[in-house]
Amino acid sequence: MAETAKIINPNKIVLVPDIEAGCSLADDCPEDDFIRFKEQHPNHYVVSYINCSAGIKAESDLICTSSNAVDLVKKIPKNIPIIFAPDKNLGRWVEKQSGRKMKLWPGSCIVHETFSEEALLKLKLEHPESEIIAHPECTESLLSYSDFIGSTSKLLKHIQDSDVNKFIVLTEPGIIHQMRIKEPLKSFYDVPGIDGCSCNLCPHMRLNTVEKVINSLKNLNPRLELDKEISIRALKPIEKMLELSN
Ligand code: SF4
């Protein structure tokens, strides 16, 4: 996200409180391997989820978010074959929703693949009146149990619109804090990782602590810098997303 902010605002200072805070999904799609993948599938239109590196954005024709992915893919003419990267789970869900078959890059997010199916079913048995709500980065088997699937913003809206009072939440549990602020009288349950581990918490996001945010604002450091040529190329598919979203 920091890279996207810098691509859109190349002349502004973009701070990353902990410069090591990356993303397993972005790391799962190295640029050189992706270029080879594109060469194996020539003449494909490349749609990339915004959670990818600046280098992958520069290799893409269109960027999407989990909110707009289905609508944007539906707008691509049916005779044009599509590559979708880097998340295979989101890609598979977009395929189902849009009816478009795509070549999926086999990447995934460590957090959304780690939820324990057994723990999920146990929670549902304990709270049969609850709804299971999930982010489309989850695996297909987890999504098959879900009553509602949507991006973070759509999940937040859904818990406010729904008459249900209990929700089992299949996404990074950091969102549950915002859900409790929006709906203090409703109950939210996160799903532990396989073997009860706490790997359902994103290790990357948690590197950015409040102390580090304060320090970075005081010192205006660490700053994110990007290669100019990559940045210029990466801006085009982001602009295309904005154009098609209007
Ligand atoms: S939860 Fe963490 S690893 Fe997964 S997509 Fe988000 S930032 Fe990346």
Image (cartoon, rainbow, N blue to C red):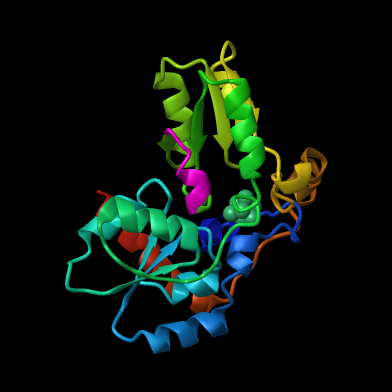
Res. 120 image quadrant: top right
Q: Is residue 44 left or right of residue 225?
A: left
Give the total of numbered labels: 0
Residue 207 image offset from top left, x and y in percent: 77, 50
Quarter occupied by residue 62 = bottom left
Quadrant including the N terminus: bottom right
Q: Residue at x 64, y 45 (%)?
A: 115
Query: Horizontally, is 204 left or right of 75 in the view?
Result: right
Decide if residue 7 is in sight here.
yes
Q: Position of residue 118 (x, y in %)?
A: 65, 40
Q: Nearer the viewer, residue 62 or 195?
A: 195
Please tell me whether residue 54 is drawn above or below residue 94 in the rendered image.
below
Q: Compare residues 244 and 179 and report the one nearer the observer.
A: 179
**Residue at left offset 49%, top offset 34%:** 133
Indicate whether 166 appears above or below 47: above
The front one of 105 and 53 is: 105
Q: Position of residue 241 (x, y in %)?
A: 33, 58
Looking at the image, residue 88 sits to the left or right of residue 14; the answer is: left
Q: Residue at x 55, y 67 (%)?
A: 107
Placement of 4 over or under 130, stated as above or below: below
Which x, y percent locates residue 223?
A: 70, 60
What is the magenta range? 140-147
Is 53 within the magenta?
no
Q: Residue at x 56, y 15 (%)?
A: 186
